[in-house]
């Protein structure tokens, strides 16, 4: 078994400062390789949600008015904190419910007031507000284009709260996301297993059957950001991640797409 005290004792006594530090680092790295300690995946910043709708500008306005987003540099994009909701034109996108990306969640200080506002605006209510003991008050609605939205009253995480996936094997999905994009393994309210990216929770529910692929649905894909896409792509390929679109230039961006379990579509991009 690895003994850190023996390792420190084995270091040469001659030489000080940076030389000794580098020797120690080299020995520790060698021990990690020898004993097979797995490398921790670097956590990539969560970047965006891709929403497919017939009228992107109208959808962006709806999310600003009712979900509390702020205008981005283009009329088809909305910021929720550092996360972009990117609306793209599609006439025949299918509703999100039942797909691998089942819904997104937003948190409000007063859920009853928000539900009254949405109902007055004619928003479809899927599940009325109710208290879940030990968790929080929650409700489900659907935006005018088929995106299922969970509304919660969680003072700890206001605004864009979570992404809810469905998978045949939730643990396999959790591992794939963690191995690929990092994230902190945590429990929401000490109850629900999840991955945490900045302040965004990724929750994974067991699906009784294979969920619909995300591509072609109103929530088309998830998006993570890399500082160096080529290097990140090489690291992902070394882990066996399948690329459906190789890294390429797209205007000022560099983009790529990968496919995860249950045909989860993910964009990995590099911004200028």
Image: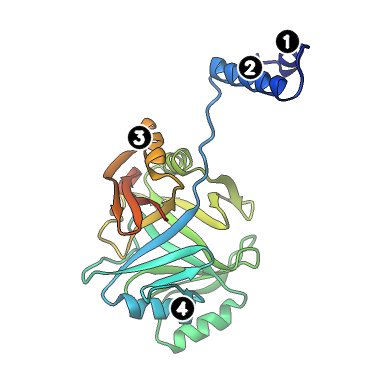
Q: How far apart in space, not on screen, are marks 1 and 3 (Cα)?
A: 37 Å
- The residue furthest left is 92
The residue shown at (63%, 20%) is 28
Sequence-wise, the earlier of marks 4 and 3 is: 4
Q: Are marks 2 and 1 in contact (CB under 8 Å)?
A: yes
Quickly name the residue at label 4: 64
Measured from the top left, where is residue 216 in percent x and y?
25, 60
Q: Nearer the viewer, mark 1 or mark 3?
A: 1
Label 3: element kind: helix
The reply to whether discs 1 and 3 touch (Cβ–Cβ < 8 Å) is: no
Q: How is the image coloured?
A: rainbow
Is residue 44 or residue 195 the one in the foreground? 44
Residue 94 drawn at (x, y percent):
26, 65
Residue 236 falls in image quadrant: top left
The residue beneath circle 1 is 10
Which residue position is annotated with label 3? 237
The CA span between labels 2 and 3 is 28 Å
- Please rate how many residues cluster around mark 2, counting C-alpha atoms within 10 Å: few if below 14, some from 14 to 19, many from 20: some
| Residue at screen point 44% across, 65% down | 84
Q: Position of residue 132 (x, y in %)?
A: 59, 65
Callout 2: SS: helix
């Amino acid at each position: 078994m690895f003994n850190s005290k023996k390792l420190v004792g084995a270091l040469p006594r001659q030489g000080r400062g940076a030389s000794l530090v580098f020797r120690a680092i080299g020995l520790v790295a060698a021990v990690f390789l020898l004993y097979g300690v797995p490398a921790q995946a670097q956590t990539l910043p969560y970047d965006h949600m891709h929403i497919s709708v017939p009228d992107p500008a109208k959808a962006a306005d709806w999310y600003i008015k009712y979900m509390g987003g702020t205008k981005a540099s283009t009329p088809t994009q909305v910021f929720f904190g550092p996360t972009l909701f990117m609306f793209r034109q599609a006439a025949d996108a299918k509703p999100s419910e039942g797909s691998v990306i089942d819904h997104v969640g937003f948190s409000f200080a007063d859920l009853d007031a928000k539900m009254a506002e949405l109902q007055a605006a004619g928003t479809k209510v899927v599940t009325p507000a109710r208290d879940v003991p030990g968790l929080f008050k929650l409700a489900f609605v659907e935006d005018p284009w088929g995106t299922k939205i969970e509304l919660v009253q969680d003072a700890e995480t206001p605004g864009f709260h979570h992404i809810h996936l469905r998978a045949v094997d939730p643990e396999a999905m959790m591992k794939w996301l963690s191995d690929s994009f990092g994230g902190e393994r945590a429990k929401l309210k000490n109850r629900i297993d999840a991955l945490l990216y900045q302040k965004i929770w990724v929750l994974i529910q067991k699906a009784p059957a294979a969920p619909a692929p995300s591509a072609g649905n109103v929530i088309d894909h998830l998006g993570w950001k890399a500082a160096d896409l080529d290097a990140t792509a090489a690291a992902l390929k070394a882990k066996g991640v399948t690329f459906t679109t190789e890294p390429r230039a797209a205007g000022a961006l560099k983009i790529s797409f990968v496919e995860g379990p249950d045909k989860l579509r993910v964009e990995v991009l590099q911004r200028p």
